[in-house]
Amino acid sequence: MIIPTMSDNKQEFLPFHAINEFMRNDYRLTVVRTALQALPSLPAELRASIDRLTKHFVKVPGFRNSAQAPTGVKMNPMAAAFEKSPELVAAILAAWAEVHLELRQQVYDLLTGRGWELLPMEANRAKLPGFMIHWPKGENFEKLNQAFHVKYPEVQSEADDVSLMVVWLSARLPYDVGDEQAAPTAG
C-alpha cells in the first residue's frame, strides 16, 4: 500500500511494517527483544506508546493486558504483531534507535556526509506516515556498511544494525532505487 503525502511533489510512502520484507525473522526478534528489554529505561512518552500499542495489538495467552506480561513471554507475540502493525513497528524502531544512541549519531553523520537529506536526529520519525520509497542512486546497504566501517574502524556494529539505523534515520526503504531527486550522494 503506497500512501502519497499532501505536498506538491507527492512523496510516496510505504507503511512502517513494510520493513518486514527487508528483515530476517531472527533479526526482527532481536530488535523486538532489544526494545522490550530497554523499556524501563526509555523516555516516558516512548514507554507509554509501546505499552498502549502492546495492549491493542499484542495478544499474550494468559494476560488480559499484554503490556504486563514478562518480556520473555511477550517477545514472540510482539514480533508477530510487528509484522502487521505499522504503529507498533514505528514505536519499536524508535525505542531500538534510542537504545543505540552512539550508532544513531555515527550513522547520521555518515549519511549527512554522503549528502543524504535527513530530518534532524531528534525528530520523531514515528509520526511520519511510513517509509519513503525512493532510495538514492548508487547507494545500497553493502556500500553504506563498508563506508561506515571505513569511517569508524574501531566500532564493532553488526551490518544489520547499521542498515536498520540507515533505514530509520533516512525514513527510506530501498523500494525504488535510483531516484535522483531523493538524496544526492557523494560517490
Image: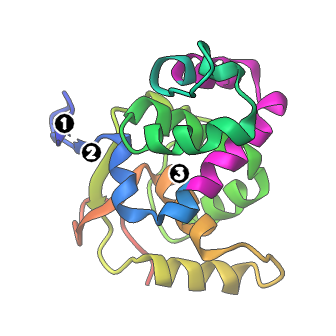
Nearest the viewer among 55 and 5 is 55
Above or below, 176 against 172 in this view is below
Q: Which of the labelled discs sits on residue 177, or is there none?
A: none
Q: Is residue 97 visible?
A: no
Residue 51 located within the stretch drawn in magenta: yes
Lower position in the chain sequence, tag 1 or tag 3 = 1
Residue 146 located within the stretch drawn in magenta: no
Label 1 and label 2: CA atoms lie apart by 6 Å
Query: Which residues make up the magenta segment?
Result: 29-53
Q: Choose top left, top right, bottom left or bottom right for residue 162.
A: bottom right
Q: Which of the labelled discs sits on residue 14, or is there none?
A: 2
Lower position in the chain sequence, tag 1 or tag 2 = 1
Q: Amino acid at mark 3?
A: Leu
Determine contact: label 1, label 2, CB under 8 Å: yes
Above or below, 126 against 80 in this view is above
Q: Which residue is mark 3?
A: 169
* Label 2 CA crowd tier, 10 Å (few <14, some 14–19, many 20+): many
Q: Which of the labelled discs sits on residue 3, or is there none?
A: 1
Q: Choose top left, top right, bottom left or bottom right for residue 52.
A: top right
Q: Amino acid at mark 1?
A: Ile
Nearest the viewer among 90 and 105 is 90
Q: How is the image coloured?
A: rainbow
Q: Is residue 101 left or right of residue 133?
A: right
